[in-house]
Image (cartoon, grey):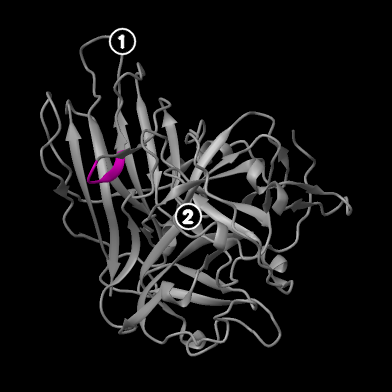
Amino acid sequence: MKTPVFTIGGLFCIVLFLNCHKTWETPPLYTGPMLEANTSIRTLQQHHLPNNYEKILDDWIIEGVVTANDEKDNFYKSIVIQDSSAAITLRLDGYALYREFPVGKKIWVKLRGLWMGDYAGMIQLGGGVDRKDPLSPQLIAIPQPLFSRYIVKSAGHYIVQPRTITPLQLHDSVQGMLVSLHGVEFAASDTGKPFADAQNQQAVSHTLKNCGPGNVYLRTSGFARFATVLTPRGNGSVTGIYTVFRTQKQILIRDTSDVQMNGLRCTISGPKLLLQEDFSLVEADSILQLPGWKHLTEIGGRYFLGKRSSQNSYAEIGAFATRQPVVITWLISPPIDLDHSANEVLRFTTKVGFDNGAILQVLVSSQYDGGNTPWKNKWTVLPAQFAKGSLSGFSPAWVPSGDISLHSLKGRIYLAFRYEGNDPPEQLGKLTSSFYLDDIQVWGN
């Protein structure tokens, strides 16, 4: 069931209500047979349309481990749970939720009868929809007396390891997940400042930046118990829940122990990372979706796929089994600004398998307009080293591209990885080589 598109208030305006703390006896742990999830959080989220509400009528069950709660009052009447695929917020109408749902507690959620919606882009589960204001309906938290109807708790304790990530890799596929940013620091103007405005009980966003491209905000509620603590001046790591507020990317920490910044701050001199893509967030065997990148098929209908192994993640492209006379596919980077750096170089690595002559090239353009027809713009082929292999399998080692100089270019540029092959019905003349691509970086001084 879906409802019409609605307008919504800010994600954090909910936090502006004063918390009152009540106590009650923690219900006993579930000791019966363990439930079994029959869908994943990622699959559940795929049933949501932005700015809509959906009532769940199927007998679906998800499971997840609690990664955040209200223990330090930076999360209000909610917990966050995460499985191997994704994470989601549960709106719960209770106080001191951390006693019943501590971090590390695995729970099962019986979804039939619950509602799914979003606040400024953050997908959440609740117990109903408040439609008193038809122009601004709101998701209702699950009432405390109904917790046991929908939620079953395990007896064990589980550890969710945060996913190490860069600001540029924060996108919808990791929404709500526990992430860790390394080599970050507060903007100079945000150092030595309270995490939030406790006096006026107002939430505050501080800018987090690293020594490369990309920023993110650290958001803290004015009701958080650590609101008066001052932000550190060093460089280090931040671990927290990745959230969004419309287009703004935000990290919410559970406690100040999630912020470890004892290192030296970034310096202006020295190498700067202008672009990085290591495909660490790709979904295995799914069409590649990278934030800020364009992924287009010019002809032949074949796309790059995300691939995962036990030690690595990467992109793969090949024309095998397309049965197309021509296959041309483009993977185009976000724009790269070269006006504030010098001596820029591009690096990446490749492997190739069943190599019968298909081509992977890297090109550069300052004329591309970011549209869906890059083949209509002027591109220059860059002199890179690509892997070469045999007809019977993949090359054993990743081949570095070498340092590809970009220093003669200025302004905004785009890089493109262009695959060209074919798979005609006849056996002769097939060019179906499969390429692996990984560790794309652009450095400058």
Q: Pick whichever of labels 2 and 1 is earlier in the sequence.
A: 2
Is residue 312 one of those drawn in magenta? Answer: yes
Q: Position of residue 424 (x, y in %)?
A: 31, 15
**Magenta highlight range:** 310-315
**Which amino acid type is shown beneath numbered disc 1?**
Pro
Tell me the crowding category of disc 1: few under 14, some 14 to 19, or many 20 or more residues within 10 angstroms, Cα based: few
Q: In the rendered image, which quarter contains the C terminus? A: bottom left
Residue receiving disc 2: 177
Give the quarter of the image for residue 200. bottom right
Q: Which mark is residue 28?
A: none
Tell me the crowding category of disc 2: few under 14, some 14 to 19, or many 20 or more residues within 10 angstroms, Cα based: many
What residue lies at 65% left-to-right and 28% top-to-bottom?
58
Q: Which mark is residue 425?
A: 1
Note whether 226 is above or below 413 in the view shown: below
- Position of 232 compared to 145: left or right? left
Q: Position of residue 154 (x, y in %)?
A: 47, 46
